[in-house]
Each structure stands twice: as C-alpha cells, then as structure tokens.
Image (spheres, rainbow, N blue to C red):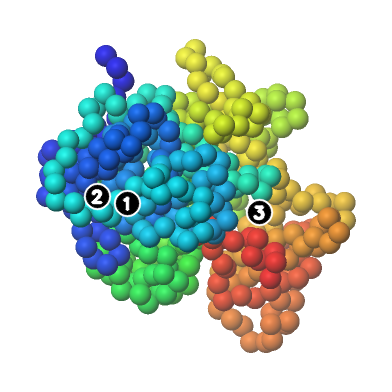
Amino acid sequence: MAEENGFLLSVEKAVRLRPQAPAYRAADGTTMTYGELWKLSDAIAATLAARTDDREPVVVLGHKAPLMVAGFLGCLKSGHAFVPVDTEMPVARLMDIVSQLGAPLLAATVPLPEALRGCVPVGRIVDVRAIASAPCPVRAPDRGRWVAGEQTQYLIFTSGSTGRPKGIEVSARNVARFMDWVRTFPVIGEGGRVFLDQPPYSFDLSEYEVVGALSTGGCLHAVEREETEDLRALFADLRASGVEVWASTPSFADLCLVDRSFDERLLPDVRLFLFCGEALRRSTAAALRERFPRARIANTYGPTESTVAVTYVEIGDAELAGERPLPVGAARPGTELRIVDPETGAPCEAGRTGEIVIVGDTVAKGYFRNPEKTAAAFFDATLADGSPARAYRTGDAGHLDESGMLYCDGRFDSLVKVNGFRIELEDVEENLGALPLVKQAAVVPVRRRERVAYLKACVVLRDRPAGTDFEIARLIKARLAERVPGYMVPRAVTLVGELPLTCNGKVDRKALAEA
C-alpha cells in the first residue's frame, strides 16, 4: 500500500468528526470551520491541478489569514509542495525566492505587490480570493495525487551565508513524524485546543501551530504583525482569545512581559508555553512561572533542517535553580543527538562542547537545487538500532550531560575574537540577563575595517535606577565585570526601550549592530 500523507489524514479526520468546529479565527474575528477549510482547499487543489500536471513547488503569498492555510492544504492535495511567502518580507527577498524557483505558480491570497508583477507571468498567478468567492462546487483531485512519503511537503527559505535565502526541502514523512511527536505533548495531546498563531508562515516555528492545531482538531487564533507592535491592541485581542497553547520565540514573550498586565488574568486559559527559535533565558522562564503558575513552560530546540524541533524539556524549579543556561531538552523518539569535534568529527564525551549533529527521521531532504550545500551539511547515517537515517551538521555548539539532556552553547559562527580573545556572544548575554537591573540584553559585534573592534550591549532595564544613561551603563558594566573577565565586558552599553524584532519574532541583531 502506498504511503499516504499523515498530516492531511489527521486534518481529514478532524473535518469528519467536527465539521462545524472552528479551525481558524482571523485577526478581524472572522472564523473558518473545519468543513469550510477542507472545502476551500479542495477548490484550490482542483484549480492547481488544472493548471499543471507536474509537481513543481507552489508559492503561497499572503499573511495571517485562513486563505493561507487553505492554500497549504490545497497544494498538498494537488501534489505540490507549498512555499510560504509572507508579505512582510522585503520585496527584494520575495523576488529572490521567486527567481530561485524559476517561474512558479503563485497562489495569491492578497493583491500582488507591484514589484512582483514583472517577474510572475499573469498566467502563473492563481487568485485564491476568487476561488474562495466562487459558489460552484468542485471535485478535488484524487487522493492518489496527494504529496506523500519522501515528496517535499514544504520549502522554507532561510538566511544564507551568501546573502541569498536558501530553500530547505521538508518531506511529507518528516512532517508526519514531527506531528506524531507534537501530539504527545501535554495539553496539545488532549485535542481541541486554541493555539496562538503569531509567527509568520514563512518561519517554520509556525508549523508548531499549523500542525499541532489542525491535526488535533484545535483552532488557530491569528495575531497580525500590527497588533504585536501595539501592546494595548494585542492584549485586547488576547483577552478574548481563549488561547491555551502559546508557541513563539522567547523574544516575543519578553516583549509581552515588559507590560506587568501580561499574566494569567489576561490569559486565564493558557496551559502551555512552547518556545523555539532562540535561547530561552532564565529570567524569561522565571517571569512566566510567576505570572502563569498553572501553565507549563517548555523549551525546545531544532533548526529548520530538522523539521522545526527535535528536543523537549519542561522548565521547573529544578531547571531554574543555579545560574547555568537552561537545557533545551532530550531528543524526540526517532532522533539521536551527537556532539562531535567540529574539526575532526570525533565524538565528544558528556559535558564537553562540540558541534551538534542531528540524526533521525525528521532531518530534511536538503537544500533546494543546491547539491553542493546539501552535501556539505547533510549525510547518510545509521541510528543505534541499525536503521538508516539522514544526518545534519547544525553548526550549533552544545553539549550533552550524562542523562542525555542537551544544552546549547551558541553558534560556532557567533564566536568572535576581540583583541585576540575568543568570546561567545550568548555567554555575555546570559550574564547580562542575570543582573537584577537587566530585563533583556543583546550583544552585537561592532566591526571596523573587516574586523571586530569591540562589543556593544543593547539593554532593556527591569526598573530604571536613578542616574543618567551614562551612569547606568557604567553601573551595568561594573556589575558584569564581577561575573565575567574584563575582555568580555562590552565597551558600549546602550539603553533601549525594547529590542527590535524581525518579522519572525527573533531579536533583529542586524538592526542593533547598525544603530
């Protein structure tokens, strides 16, 4: 029997059991039921199948709207990988992605940006809004056309070292194995939960919500980018949301925690905070435990190349004790974590930092149309039980303790050398964040003539003490010098009201470095 798409089958089951249940609640309050979502995705699938017989990737363009999710399902039903592209991306980046795909079909859920009109032929544009408004019933493609097995389910484009985004091909089987794991998480596994839907769909963290919610009969509660820039509007929306599962980067939670009204009175139903994408600081987890005492706080880790995340750990009192960085979790079933010397590839013993290598059934297929990059980062391996699996060299520094718990120690490419001293930027940030004065901190290198001249720390204060900015900055540097060697103390400390975030909800380090 041919392998089927586990994710689509799970959504279909939710449709069959509760067709009138809400699957998506948009920022304007409108909802789309499971029955409506499935019907619309059938219509999109039929339109795509009529346009082409091959299995080329299809760009789905838009922002937070049910049409986007229906577009993803429609692509999968018609045999196409979907390429989520958010309208918040710079136009130049949108054009770069489209050009790498050749002349792709583009399913537009919003008016096409003017700059794209010249590089996407009219005949290659599918207007999802027109499909949604068409009253005529359609016959969906036969399920034998569904994306399945090792066929690519989605392509996510992330930053590349060359300055051009690189596409990562994640298979239907990868997503199915990821889904099976996520459905074992507390709260999510109970089914029918309301998920905060905040990260853009072009950021693979959003797969936590899309896969977690739709495969368990839950509802996606969308949050627009504009809301995240206005806490009053955001909190007004959240107050009536009924959100039970919060999945985001730690930086987005920090943004909300700046306001003291962000607590369980605002979100009385939240039961799980699920973090990925960047380091979860002790101060963030501690604040959440204080303000949401009934909620679980889970830390996870994984690059896009391994299908969102591969580890899980709940952060409790034991994990918050002491001053060491928080663990990012133990490996999911079907995944093995190996720590190797980045230069020799030799295994590292427990406690020793090396490069994190992920081996398992959610490691992606590779980089889209880039065999050289794929060969450099991916390779064939064998799990402990002898079964074959793909492996991925992450470039992340980390170590395993004796129990197999993973700790991230930063990136090898975030190690900088200042005056001959090697400094891990996250090490400095962690120690800054431990200071009572500091709510958040990001450290960036300042370069002069192609070398790092000094470090700059951008700091959000917890409570502002008396004194000028200069005096407070000097105090912060003095307190930090009590925790780290002098060469690790940033030369410049800038006080900011908040740390800027990228559209993916991560700290915008490029903006900080250029400020």
Numbered disc 1: secondary structure: strand
Name the kind of residue labelled 3 in the image.
Answer: Glu
Numbered disc 2: secondary structure: helix
The residue lying at 47 percent from left, 55 percent from top is 117
Q: Position of residue 425 (x, y in %)?
A: 70, 54
Name the kind of residue labelled 1 in the image.
Answer: Asp
- Give 381 or 472, whichever is nearer the viewer: 381
Q: Can you say whether 321 is above or below 513 in the image?
A: above
Q: How far apart are marks 1 and 3 (CA)?
A: 45 Å
- Give me the disc on residue 426: 3
Q: Can residue 504 be seen in this view?
A: no
- Give 251 or 15, whichever is nearer the viewer: 15
The mark that comes first in sequence, 1 or 3, is: 1
* Location of the C terminus (image quadrant): bottom right
Q: Name the residue under label 1.
A: 127
Q: 505 left or right of 188?
A: right
Q: Where is residue 106 in the image (x, y as percent from the top left)?
A: 40, 46
Q: Distance between the residues labelled 3 and 2?
A: 48 Å
* Location of the N terminus (image quadrant): top left
Name the kind of residue labelled 2 in the image.
Answer: Ile
The residue lying at 81 percent from left, 51 percent from top is 417
Q: In which quarter of the image is residue 141?
A: top left
Q: Name the residue under label 2.
A: 131
Whether the residues at callouts 2 and 1 have beta carbons within 8 Å, the answer is: yes
Whether the residues at callouts 3 and 2 have beta carbons within 8 Å, the answer is: no
Q: Distance between the residues labelled 2 and 1?
A: 7 Å
